[in-house]
Image (tube, rainbow, N blue to C red):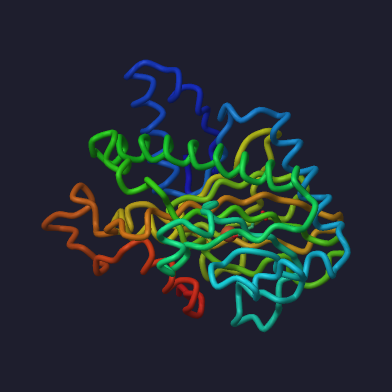
Amino acid sequence: MSDFDIPVLDFSRFREGDAAARAGFAGELGRACRDTGFFLLKNTGILDAQRTAMFTVARDFFALPAEAKEAVAIANSPHNRGYVAQQVEALDPASGVADAKEAFNVGLDLGADHPEVVAGKPFRGVNLWPAGEPTFKAECLGWYDACLRLGAELHEAFAIDLGLPEDWFVDKFQAPLATLRLLRYPAGGEGIGAGAHSDYGSVTLLATDGVAGLQVQPRALRGTGEWLDVPSVPGAFVVNIGDCLERWTNDVYVSTPHRVLAPKAERFSIAFFLDPDPDAEVAALPTCTGPDRPARHAPTTGAQHLAERLNATYKHRS
Ligand SMILES: O=C(O)CCC(=O)C(=O)O
Ligand SMILES: [Fe+2]
């Protein structure tokens, strides 16, 4: 396997396999996380029917009149939820080009009377929902839960690969900072779909409709101006490591820059960004540090890390 491979991993080996199969899966996963930080994950247990329904409601949402979408604009939420119109966000601000995509964010679904919402805890707030769209809300929350479970199981495999107890991450993902993001890239091939960036969280689970456009820049290509197309396998998730897990693993796992070209045909994708609990300590893992590898980053928390990454100008790696 070279730096250029985006391997396809079979999650049923981990979920249904014996200890040896689970260890084998974890080893392959670990290699992908160290090399490219991107892999495809098939046989996740999420049914095609649920995936189809999710894409259908996303398509219907973006087809609503602009006023209906603006009524749930992210500007109305202090907690990173709601609708983002085209040309509003620039994931690569240094490029001077805004993203052609539009998006809708859903966070952990807490009621207005939840103690952490009442207390005004950062990122803890109510979701914004378009009026009269109960199916939209139900599918979004169903997808959110399915991704949360899958993300938690993946962290068991990360723990095995990293030489930690299998349940090491469990108490760090009890009520995590996770964001579901529906994305629509308009047809036409103008500008950039989503500018070059790395993701902020621990891991991202991405479902796409198969329309090409997503590209990654593994370490070996940095500075060359060359990008690698991410292949599409029907039903499989594109999974990538984000900055939080890179930091947690003391840079053993890699959070790889990626971008989305403006597609010729309309393109939809459903991203799920999984960050740990707000108060979870994110400090270099004991198995990723040693005399030859001192901790490279100061300890932080889930909420602090996310706030810094959302507020800061995006990082530029040389
Ligand atoms: O839509 C995609 O394929 C990727 C989107 C992405 O990278 C992001 O929103 O962080
Ligand atoms: Fe991304």
Image-quarter location of ligand 2: bottom right
Q: Is residue 9 above or below residue 268?
A: above
Left or right: 38 with respect to 106? left
Q: Is residue 266 above or below residue 156?
A: below
Quadrant in which the C terminus is drawn: bottom left
In depth, the one of 178 and 92 nearer the eye is 178
Furthest toward the front, the residue is 113
- Residue 315: give x, y in percent of width and height: 47, 74
Horizontally, residue 49 falls left or right of residue 1, namely right
Residue at image coords 54%, 45%: 239
| Residue located at (49% from left, 58% from top) | 113
Q: Position of residue 157 (x, y in %)?
A: 37, 35
Compared to 197, does 37 lie above or below? above
Quarter of the figure with residue 156: top left
- For residue 56, which quarter of the picture? top right
Image coordinates for residue 216, horizontal then vertical, percent: 59, 57
Figure check: 245 above or below 6: below
- Going 69% across and 47% down the picture, which residue do you hit? 137
Q: Indicate left or right for 57 with 249 as reference.
A: right
